[in-house]
Image (cartoon, grey):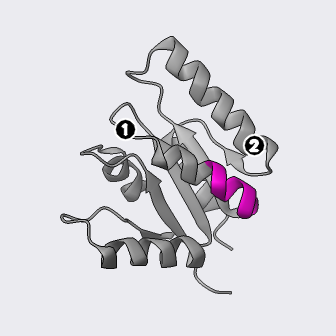
Amino acid sequence: MKNKKVFLGGTCNQSTWRNALIPQLQIEYFNPVVAVWTEEAYQEEILQREKCTYCLYVITVDILGVYSIAEVVDDSNKRPQKTIFCFLEEGFSPPQIQSLKAVGKMVQNNGAHWLNGLPEVALFLNQNLY
């Protein structure tokens, strides 16, 4: 059986969720965060999204744009079995949380996974190693 790997997509912008999740993982991962975003980095991200067993999108209050939301919805349509959505409620307003829950329902309705918090994400990934 090939090694499974997870793409760590979602909020960048100095967000520390990846630092909190990575030590909990027993699965290989690709972290798309780089010091300088280049065309090469973008192409590698596209390649890794295709190659990885799972594409995880974690949204935090540090998000500046909406592209990560578009990516998770797009992936939930194109490759639902490998798409995972999670958002961390801390810092979001009630209307923002309501909107993110609607995204979660949409992703789930497409057949993808909507998980609640980093411990649940780590558990899911580690239990689905093989």
Q: Which mark is residue 63?
A: 1
Label drawn at residue 108: 2
Helix, strand or loop at mark 2: helix
Outermost residue, front direction? Answer: 39
In percent of width and height, residue 95 lies at: 53, 14
User: What is the C-alpha distance between the residues marked 2 and 1?
Assistant: 21 Å
Counting the numbered discs, the total is: 2
Q: Residue at x 39, y 40 (%)?
A: 65
Q: Where does the image place residue 130, in percent across and percent down from the top left?
A: 69, 74
In x, y percent, where is residue 24?
43, 55
| Viewer-side label of 2, 1 | 1
| Sooner in the amino-acid sequence: mark 2 or mark 1 | 1
Element marked by disc 1 = loop
Residue nearer the viewer, 79 or 16: 79
At x 30% / y 43%, what residue is drawn?
Answer: 15
- Circles 2 and 1: CB distance less than 8 Å? no
Q: Amino acid at mark 1?
A: Ile
- Give the residue at x 65% y 58%: 75
Q: Is residue 74 magenta?
A: yes
Q: Quadrant of residue 22?
A: bottom left
Main SS class of the magenta portion in the image: helix
Q: Nearer the viewer, residue 117 or 47?
A: 47
Does the magenta-highlighted stretch encompass residue 10?
Answer: no
Question: Is disc 2 surrounded by few (<14), some (14 to 19) or many (20+) residues within 10 Å?
Answer: some
Task: State the residue lying farthest toward the bottom.
Answer: 1
Q: Which stretch appears magenta?
A: 73-81
Task: Name the kind of residue labelled 2 in the image.
Answer: Gln
